[in-house]
Each structure stands twice: as C-alpha cells, then as structure tokens.
Amino acid sequence: MNQLSDRARASFLASAQTKLDCADLLAPVIAIAAERMASALLDGRKILVCGNGGSAADAQHFSSELLNRFELERPALPAIALTTDSSTLTSISNDYQYAQVFSRQIQALGQSGDLLLAISTSGNSPSITQAVEAAQEREMVVIALTGRDGGELARLAQGYGDVVICVPSQSTARIQEVHLLVLHCLCDLIDQQLLGGFD
Ligand SMILES: O=C(CO)[C@@H](O)[C@H](O)[C@H](O)[C@H](O)COP(=O)(O)O
Ligand SMILES: [Zn+2]
C-alpha cells in the first residue's frame, strides 16, 4: 500500500515539476498561438483540431470549450474536432489508410485562413503529419502541440513559420498533462482577446 501511495505521490510531483519547467519556456509561444487563434476567429474562420488516443480526447475537450464556453459568457465559437464521427473515421481508414483519417477531412472542410491545431505527444504520428501537410496545402494556419523533440510535426510546422508548442519531456503521460494546461491557457487567452480584456 505504501509503495503504491509513494508511486502516486511521485507522479504528482513529476507532473507539477514538468509544468513548472514549462512555465517560462512555453508562455510566450502560447501567447502567439492564442493571438493567431483569436485573429482567425475574428476574421470569421474556424478551428479544426486533431489528435490520437489521449490527444483525441484533448482535441474534443478543446473544441467543446470553444463551441460551448470556457469560464466566461461569450458567443459560441466555430471549432470542429476531427476525431468524433465514427462513420467518417472508419470509412477513411477502411478505404484508404489510417494515416489519411484527418487529412481527408481537412481537404473537405479546411479553407484558407482556417486554423488547424494538431496534437501529438511524439510528433511522429503519420495521421498528424499528413493532417499538417493537408492544412498547409490549403493555406491554413497551423498550431503544433507536441512533446519530446517535437518530431516531424515540429519540423513541418517550423518550415512554414507556423507555431510549435513543445513540452520537452520524454513521458507521454507528463506531456499530455501539460497539454491540457496549455489548452486551458489558450481558451483563457482567446476569451481575454475577444472580450476586450487586453488592448
Ligand atoms: O493516452 C495515451 C497514453 O497516455 C495513449 O492513448 C496515446 O495517446 C496513444 O498511444 C497515441 O496513439 C499516441 O500518439 P501521439 O501522441 O504520439 O501522436
Ligand atoms: Zn493517457
């Protein structure tokens, strides 16, 4: 029992330390990402979001906070998680390949000036890198939320001057825990810009 308790406590400390390590490192790039998101929304564009596994849940969490609300009362905002329609997900994977599961949807839904938030802890999932390539072909803005060394996702995004938010941890769980905090920061900073909290 004590060993289990010690292990749980160690996870809390590791998670908190990873967040502390990222505060100064990521705050400036989170601010830039939030400015690009607010600018796209004010221009009447929409935000598409994708990710696999835990990051699929994060994609849906974020899109629902824009569509519905975060902490403040404000108009509904246009965001679509590309992870939710099982008929679309299974047919693309079945007829083509899983790596196209998001890029095919972006080819259908993405328009110039729209924004893609691409979430991958490794930065190397082919479904995510192909999504970014499809978005860049459509002249969309890309925000890459990643971990470890950023992988291929960071390389692709940087090549187009897109924003990369990278949690420099080797643990998928710790990266995901910081990703959730980043997503809540983005919601908060979008609301502050849209509701006039800042000049
Ligand atoms: O949530 C977890 C682990 O915490 C897993 O489900 C994880 O999200 C999956 O293995 C994903 O397929 C990993 O993909 P990615 O983050 O490397 O793009
Ligand atoms: Zn997880």
Image (cartoon, rainbow, N blue to C red):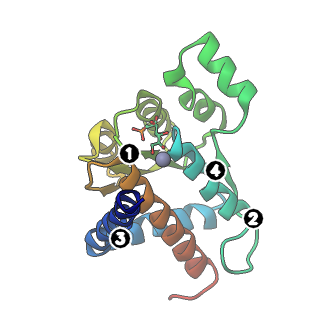
Q: Earlier in the sequence, mark 3 or mark 4?
A: 3
Q: Which residue is drawn at 35% across and 73% down?
A: 27
Instruction: Give amino acid for label 4.
Output: Gln
Q: Which of marks 3 and 2 is nearer the N terminus?
A: 3
Question: Do labels 3 and 1 touch, CB within 8 Å?
Answer: no
CA gap, disc 2 and disc 1: 26 Å
- On the image, numbered disc 4 is attached to which residue? 60
10 Å crowding of disc 2: few (<14), some (14-19), many (20+): some
CA gap, disc 4 and disc 2: 12 Å
Q: Can residue 36 be seen in this view?
A: no
- On the image, numbered disc 1 is attached to which residue? 121
* Residue 62 in the image, given as x and y percentages of width and height: 60, 58
10 Å crowding of disc 1: few (<14), some (14-19), many (20+): many
- On the image, numbered disc 3 is attached to which residue? 16
CA gap, disc 1 and disc 4: 16 Å
* Residue 171 in the image, given as x and y percentages of width and height: 31, 49
Q: Is mark 1 within 8 Å of ligand 1?
A: yes
- On the image, numbered disc 2 is attached to which residue? 68
| Residue 185 position (above or below residue 127) | below
Q: Earlier in the sequence, mark 1 or mark 4?
A: 4
Answer with the quarter of the image where residue 92 lies: top right
